[in-house]
Structures are given as C-alpha cells and as structure tokens.
Amino acid sequence: MTARLLSPPRPDPPAAERIELPLPHLPEAMEGRSVLHISDLHVRRYRPWFRRVIAMCGQVTPDFVCMTGDYMTLPRDEGAALTVLRDLAEVLRPRFGAFASFGNHDSEAFKRSAAETPGVHWLEHRSAVLPDFGITFLGTSTPCDLVRTILHADREERRLGVAGCSYRILLGHEPSILITCAEVGVEWALLGHTHGGQVRPGLPLAMHNSSGLPLRHSSGILRCRDSVGTISRGLGESFFDVRLFCPPQLPLYILRRGPLPGAFTRRMTCVRWW
C-alpha cells in the first residue's frame, strides 16, 4: 500500500479579533472608528474554507475595510483568487468604504482584473483623501514605491485644500516599509506578508517570516520613531498549507486617541505580539 501524506485540516476561520489601537494626532472624527483588516488570503483554489472566511467577514460591519495584498499565491491562481475576491466584496459591509492594496504574490494580470471589483477602492501607488474624517489612505505593494504614493497624496490633498493636515494611513504589505513610513510621516501602516511566522514554537518566536525583519517582529504592533505598524497574521498560507501555534487572524482595530504604545526609538521595535 502506498502511503499518502495528508495535510492537516485548516483551522476554522477566525472571528474578528477586536484590538484597541491608541494613536496620537488621530482626528476627532476617527475616535472609536473600526477598521477591519483582511490580508494574505493566498488563494490557490476555491475551497470550502474560503466560503467560511467570506461568511465570517460578512458578519462584521466596520467603519472601514482595508485589504493588504497577496490574494493569490502562484501564477495560474488568478481565476480562483478573483472569484474569492469578488464573492468577498459582495458581503463586505463597511459604513464608509473598502480600500485595498496588492502584495508581492499578486500578478499583473490579477491586478488588472481585480481593479474592476465592485465596491473596492484600489490604491496601488495611489491615495484616497477623506476630508470628512481628516484622513488619507495610501496604498503600495512595494516599499520602494512609497515615495511615488506620497507624491500622489500630496497632489490630492492640495487639490482638496487639506495639505499638511490630513492623517495618513498606509495600506502596505511588507513590514520593512515601516522604516520608510517613519521617514516620510506616515502615522499608521497596516501590514501583512509574514503570516505571523506560520509555524511558531511560541511567542514571540517564529520559524520564518519571509522578510528581513527579526523573527520576533513577525506579528503584532511595531513602532519606528513616531510611526506604528500593525502586522496581521493573515488568513492564508504560503509554500505549505500548515499553521502551527499561529492561527489565522482577522483583526478589527478600534481606533483611540492616545499615546503611541512603546518607547520612542530610532530602530524598529515590536511593542506587542499576537
């Protein structure tokens, strides 16, 4: 008899995890607002697990939805990933909008088709200024293109008469971009890419995080100077369909006006793990 290696069953999709996030200089209109963070679906084929993920996302009514890339995994996954994305977009119920950026696994063909997803504002190297809330969403899939995104935000804020006074929130992907955020004045970055390490012997240890960051920086709240980055463990897996002591995550950030967590430092530090 030929032995077959079976992948362990995926954990159940997570319920939205409520996380209180203090941010100084947060506009009054954003006090108490909620942001649902969806990241790293890594669709290869449309499995029943993704239907449960979509149903879980549809049970939340946040003020904003932010998606930060890696909807697909490998070339030729575009069709399945687009189907999941469109089904997801149909059930999302943000009060004030859904905004999205791409990740390093998302192909150019996928990006072109995803841009037509109803109800999602795509911010690849672009920005969306919301004067009623005093914020600007920016999006980029690669750290090297953040300056290009900042220039777009500068133009849009000048056009709308809010230059220099709009609170900037980045929909990024790779956590290393937080270093650049601290240089250019982006206050908060929503990040993914690491899957929280995917296999962890224990907090804050991780086996691998697909980045140049220390393994203890694989998930949680990072701080660099006066910029904060929140890294989701994500919903999917890459390379192999296994998670160990690192369940998928669907963060629901509740924004508060308050001092930044952790101490000021010119280096990137992790001030809270999850």
Image (tube, rainbow, N blue to C red):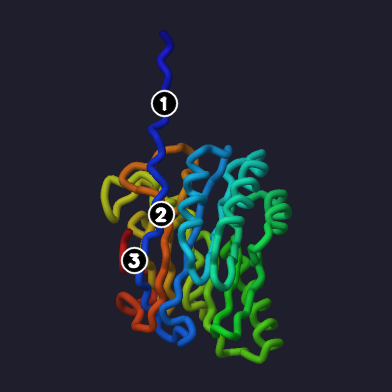
25 lies left or right of 92: left
Q: Residue at x 31, y 45 (%)?
A: 245
Q: Which mark is residue 6?
A: 1
Q: Earlier in the sequence, mark 3 or mark 2?
A: 2
Q: Which mark is residue 249?
A: 2
Label 3 SS = strand
Q: Earlier in the sequence, mark 3 or mark 1?
A: 1
Disc 2 residue type (three-letter): Gln
Disc 3 residue type (three-letter): Cys
Q: Residue at x 63, y 75 (%)?
A: 128
**Pointer 2 and pointer 1: residues touching (CB < 8 Å)?**
no
Label 2 SS = loop
**Pointer 3 and pointer 2: residues touching (CB < 8 Å)?**
no
123 lies left or right of 244: right
Res 65 seen here: yes
Relative image position of residue 15 (x, y in whole percent): 39, 55
- Within-10-Å neighbours for mark 1: few <14, some 14–19, many 20+: few
Q: In the rendered view, tell whether residue 56 sits above or below residue 120.
A: above
